[in-house]
Amino acid sequence: PASLTILGLESSCDDTAAAVVRVDDLGRANVLASVVADQTDLHAAFGGVVPEIAARAHAEKLDLCVEQALTQAEITLAEVDAIAVTAGPGLIGGVVSGVMCAKGLSAATGKPLYGVNHLAGHALTPRMTDQVPYPYLMLLVSGGHCQFLIVSGPDDFSRLGGTIDDAPGEAFDKVARLISLPQPGGPSIEQAALSGDPARFPFPRPLMDRDTCDMSFSGLKTAVLRARDAIVAEKGGLTRQDQSDIAASFQAAVVEVLATKTKKAFKNYPHDAPRTFCVAGGVAANKAIRTALETVSTQNEADFVAPPLSLCTDNAAMIAYAAAEQCHLRGPDDLTLSARPRWPL
Ligand code: KG4
Ligand code: ZN
């Protein structure tokens, strides 16, 4: 296939993003520009992402992000080969904003339009950076998702199991809120955990003896709430050390669950298949989690691949890249493309 230059748009959660990716005739990806406007400030006062505020901000920022991406890539809209957009799953108002914007760009330029599954975007990132061959085993772990996948092609995913309630990133964020650490919770818990005792609180590790890759994180959050309330009842508040000990004990529980379930995922992965284990998603930034998963990979004779953080967290480059891979398997979408709040892989 010839080289392809794709403009990607992403607006399914709280990051407004646009990117230009060129994939050469050998399938190697080159990110010419990747612009991400995060909305953390807008939602800070509410303690979580407010869908209505997110949707409005996407609608206001998308065209600006597109313009910036094109400028940074030193390319005009006329020079791109296709327009890719996250069409779900996600917060519907944001996804609609992105789809509408992409349709407008496609209609105005005549460029083909590709609606991309956000999870497929995450799942294909290891190929962008490391040209990982199919199939590979992967863990997608972020604020909204947590699942093990066998990725066998650009549009061929088999799910081995995942969370039955909260995603780990969501748990990090909620626990940070419970113990008064700043948002986003992941980095602040990781930081606090460095000076904490991971053995002080025996937080639950549910579903561990099951042979499936299913996980549960909501009980963990409730256990943290109880531990906090017990300390507050006894001493009137949390000391810095209490915060650190809770953070460390919580993180240790998440690490153990993810590592144990990764072992189970390897049991469900064909033994004679190529062996690469990839992680993606914002939680993959966590060093304790990365290290534990890398160890499990090594024990299972698999290469461990973790894309750089800028491609692990929500971005539009992965959406453009996914379209570049998928367009060899399917035709473009037309203006009937609709935004899907739910869209399992
Ligand atoms: O992939 P992402 O940017 O957005 C989606 O959820 O799709 O992931 C954001 C999540 C947040 O919940 C954040 O707290 C978590 O990833 N996160 C971390 C770390 N950095 C970000 N969790 C644990 N440790 C970290 N260092
Ligand atoms: Zn995501």
Image (cartoon, grey):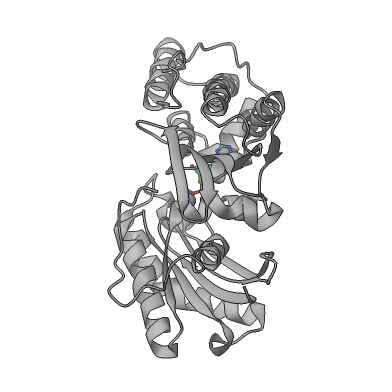
Residue 28 appears at what percent x and percent y?
69, 64
Q: Residue at x 42, y 32 (%)?
A: 161
Q: Which of the 4 quarters of the picture holds residue 187?
A: top right
Residue 261 versus residue 320 in the image, above or below: above
Q: Nearer the viewer, residue 280 or 65?
A: 280
* Res. 59 visible in picture: yes
Residue 242 versus residue 130 in the image, above or below: above
- Residue positioned most to the front: 272
Residue 96 versus residue 340 in the image, above or below: below
Q: Nearer the viewer, residue 78 or 34?
A: 78
Q: Is residue 6 left or right of residue 179?
A: right
Q: Nearer the viewer, residue 203 or 344?
A: 344
Q: Nearer the viewer, residue 224 or 145?
A: 145
Number of numbered discs overlaid on the protein picture: 0
Q: Is residue 30 left or right of residue 312?
A: right
Q: Residue at x 30, y 55 (%)?
A: 341
Q: Which of the 4 quarters of the picture holds residue 95?
A: bottom left
Q: Residue at x 62, y 82 (%)?
A: 71
* Res. 40 visible in picture: no
Residue 323 appears at what percent x and percent y?
50, 66
Q: Residue at x 39, y 13 (%)?
A: 233
Of the 4 image quadrants, the one containing the N terminus is bottom right
Q: Which of the 4 quarters of the picture holds residue 230?
A: top left
Residue 155 appears at what percent x and percent y?
46, 55
Residue 278 appears at what percent x and percent y?
62, 41
Q: Is residue 35 left or right of residue 131?
A: left
